[in-house]
Image (cartoon, rainbow, N blue to C red):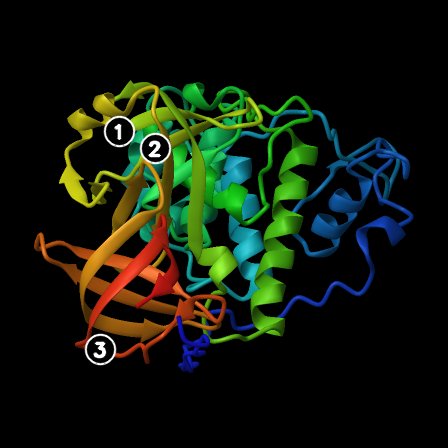
Amino acid sequence: MNQKQNATLGRPRRRMWIAAVLVLSMSLSAFAQTGFVDVEDAYWGAAYIRTAADAGIINGYPTQEEGIFRFDPEHPVSKQESLAMIYRTLQSTGLLQDETDLSEPYAQQLTAGGIAEWARLYAAYGFRYEYVAAKDFQDAGGAAFAPRQLVAMWAAKAMAYESAPAAVLPYGDGAAISDETFAFADALYRHEIMTGDNKGNLNPLDGIRRVEFAAVCTRLLEDAARKVQTPQAARKLEDSLILHSGIVRSVQTESRRFVLEKRDGSTWSVQLSADAAIIADGREISAGELVALENTFVSVSCLLGAGRQVLIGTGVQLRTGWIENLSSEDDYGVLTLSTEEGLLLRYCYDDATLADTTIRKGIDVTLIADGAYVLEIR
């Protein structure tokens, strides 16, 4: 093997969608007064509440004393309150696309959804930009509490977070997360917005409390600020490659879900996107064929971005073919390998990838890969 050659990766510029940077002038631990009579400084969520209140995302309730407000941090948030806070979060980050009141054109949906007059601006915006749907209010109106999994879906869609071909969650109650919201809960987990409780559960059907929503909004603000303050053209490899290993358990072919039991005994829930091709050991398989992998140790991997596919391998893979296409992200490259079997497989590589040839389009190669990551190219 010749000495490793480092591929030069381009850094294309991308349009920035965030128009304003929220500068957090103090760390969360440095906040003192919360501004609410029922939130003490020692309360675990005090810093989140203060940040969200300062950004205009949350409001308190008036008390009998003038100028004194309460927050009711442990009280569950209603669906329409959730929509108001998501709207204000978008507004604070500069992500709000239109401040026009769209209540009139969506009057029918708002009435059918039982949305109160004060919340119609926020819900109508959600309808317009398609992170809210009429079915979200079928069981109960806007005043009903908002389940955590529904909030996760609304927030991920509103923030335009990318869903992964393979969504993977560590929650003990992952099986209780609905098929519709699973990938969005995964997106918020990957962005460290919603990370579960201290028992390792999401509690997807429970109503989200006001303090929890304040924490979610604060993390969304910080995430948006980071993207603007560090305007890198593309994502890093560590944020793009999803790679997990373990024994496949409890396959549900219809929902394309299974449990991955890791070496440390922890169990992670996995859901494969309906639009993703499933490649197992170099062969494209159907969701129904996942059953054959039960009780087998595998690696499950995928890349975010174009090309929706999940690679499932029972070991380190050796692949032969030619490089059909090359692209670059920030600190890594992506190659599309055209295999002898007629498959187009996407792999990523970086400066740690051993190569005894110049990586370029059109050449015949043999590569050794751990999931979607190339260890060596010959």
User: Quarter of the image containing the C terminus?
Assistant: bottom left
Q: CA distance from mark 2 to mark 3?
A: 33 Å
Point out the frontmost of discs 2 and 3: 3
The disc placed on residue 271 is 2
Q: Does residue 258 lie above or below 120 as drawn?
A: above
Tell me, yes or no, whether the two marked residues, 2 and 1, touch with CB atoms within 8 Å: yes
Element at label 1: loop
State the SS at label 2: strand
Left or right of 161 on screen, residue 251: left
Local crowd at mark 2 within 10 Å, few (<14), some, or many (≥20)? many
Q: Earlier in the sequence, mark 1 or mark 3?
A: 1
What residue does disc 1 label?
Answer: 256
Alpha-carbon distance for marks 1 and 3? 34 Å
Residue 126's x, y, as percent?
39, 47
In this rendering, which labeled residue sits more in front, label 1 or label 3? Answer: 3
| Residue type, numbered disc 1 | Arg
Q: Residues within 10 Å of mark 3 (few under 14, many from 20)?
A: some
Q: Nearer the viewer, residue 1 or 12?
A: 1
